[in-house]
Amino acid sequence: MDSALKVNKGIPRPPEVNPRAGDILKKRPAKTMDLSTYLDGIKNRDISMLAQSITLIESTRPEDREKAHELISACLPLSGNSVRIGITGVPGVGKSTFIETFGKHITDSGHRLAVLTIDPSSERSKGSILGDKTRMETLANNPHAFIRPSPSGGSLGGVARKTREAVLLCEAAGFDTIFIETVGVGQSETAVHSMTDFFLLLMLAGAGDGLQGIKRGIMEMSDLLVINKADGNNVEKALQARTLYQGALRLFPPSPSSWIPTALTASSMEGTGMEKILGSINSYMNLTRCNGYFHKKRAEQAVYWMRESINDYLVSRFYDNPRIKKALPVMEQKVKEGQTDSFRAASELLDLL
Ligand code: GDP
């Protein structure tokens, strides 16, 4: 009997996405353009060209690296004119909610905001682009904001260097406020600290420092502590935590910037406390620009990144060298079998360069 209720035997639903799409995308070399196309795009504040330029600097192909270096050099004179803010805190503390709310506050006051992330564990293919876009939906649709997820994979040093280069491109494209978010609490905080002017640590009331996984060093490098989720029943606890942390911050040795770090409360969900946070950042900028610390710190950071680039270059020159490539597995085997010791083996390999 023909009836709408009759259930026909179905055919298996074909996959909506070609399962080989990932491989095809990976194999297809990225489309690259002339240096001047990238540069003009950046100068014209073309967001799509900025995104493609960042893809270029993230590329590991030697011919792209060369073009990327030229692009960065051409952008350098146009960069530097921004406030770079590092934002950290354990997962769940409310970083993305905070960035959404505080970010809107920043763009509403006439600024252009770029949000970059350092997450050495991220892999693009696992959907972190979508992840970030949905995490910060409002900002992603804000014409005055630009969100870029962490460069994928690689060592923390490599990921951090690419992010620092992306900062320069964003500045050249007219973004005057840069947020660099780190995911979780670990080594990446130090990397973010080495490329930002101001470091903001988000915390929760009620959870002990141990529970929050906050290392003393991270608190010590912070310019502002924000106790997030100060809303509903949590307001009182947040205020108590603020007093507690304020006391703890005083115990740290004075910072060479002469800035005295403070603790504030905020609710990223309800949007409270944002004005004070912006006020604190502005006071810091005024103080450090007047006393010269701002420029001194940026100059030191530039030297630090020069050294990091040298280290990166030397390491890749070593491992990419054909003679080393040939000799390395042989030497590794010899070390394994105890025919030679690690130090002698290393020295012999280095001599091959
Ligand atoms: P992240 O992992 O640090 O990026 O944290 P999220 O921004 O994803 O937030 C983690 C959870 O905390 C989410 O369920 C948010 O809705 C919630 N949350 C974030 N900020 C606030 C806040 O100010 N108040 C309250 N009550 N919840 C918040």
Image (cartoon, grey):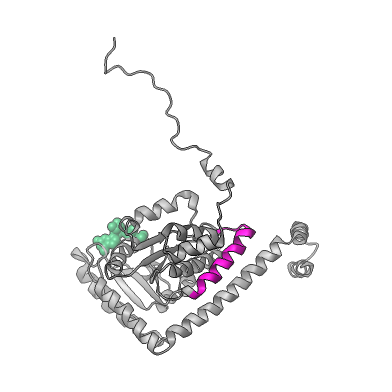
Query: Ligand 1 sits in which quadrant?
Result: bottom left
Name the residue at 50% across, 38% down: 19
Q: Quadrant of residue 201?
A: bottom left
Magenta portion: prevailing SS class: helix
Q: Position of residue 132 (x, y in %)?
A: 39, 55
Q: Position of residue 135 (x, y in %)?
A: 35, 55
Total numbered badges shown on the rendered structure: 0
Q: In which quarter of the image is the C terminus?
A: bottom right
Is residue 187 visible to us here?
Answer: no
- Left or right side of 275 for 349: right
Name the residue at 33% across, 75% down: 225
**Image vertical order of residue 337 relative to residue 214, above or below:** above
Q: Position of residue 247 (x, y in %)?
A: 31, 82
Along the line of sight, the residue nearer the viewer: 222 or 1:
1
Q: In which quarter of the image is residue 238?
A: bottom left
Q: What stretch is highlighted in magenta?
A: 59-77
Q: Which residue lies furthest to the bottom in this view?
A: 291
Name the residue at 23% across, 65% down: 271
**Image vertical order of residue 2 relative to residue 282, above or below:** above
Is residue 76 visible to us here?
Answer: yes
Would residue 74 be counted in the magenta stretch? yes
- Left or right side of 257 for 139: left
Q: Which residue lies furthest to the top in this view?
A: 1
Q: In which quarter of the image is the N terminus?
A: top left
- Left or right side of 301 for 288: left
Along the line of sight, the residue nearer the viewer: 338 or 204:
204
Q: Position of residue 20 (x, y in %)?
A: 53, 39
Q: Which residue lies furthest to the right in this view?
A: 339
Would residue 274 be counted in the magenta stretch? no
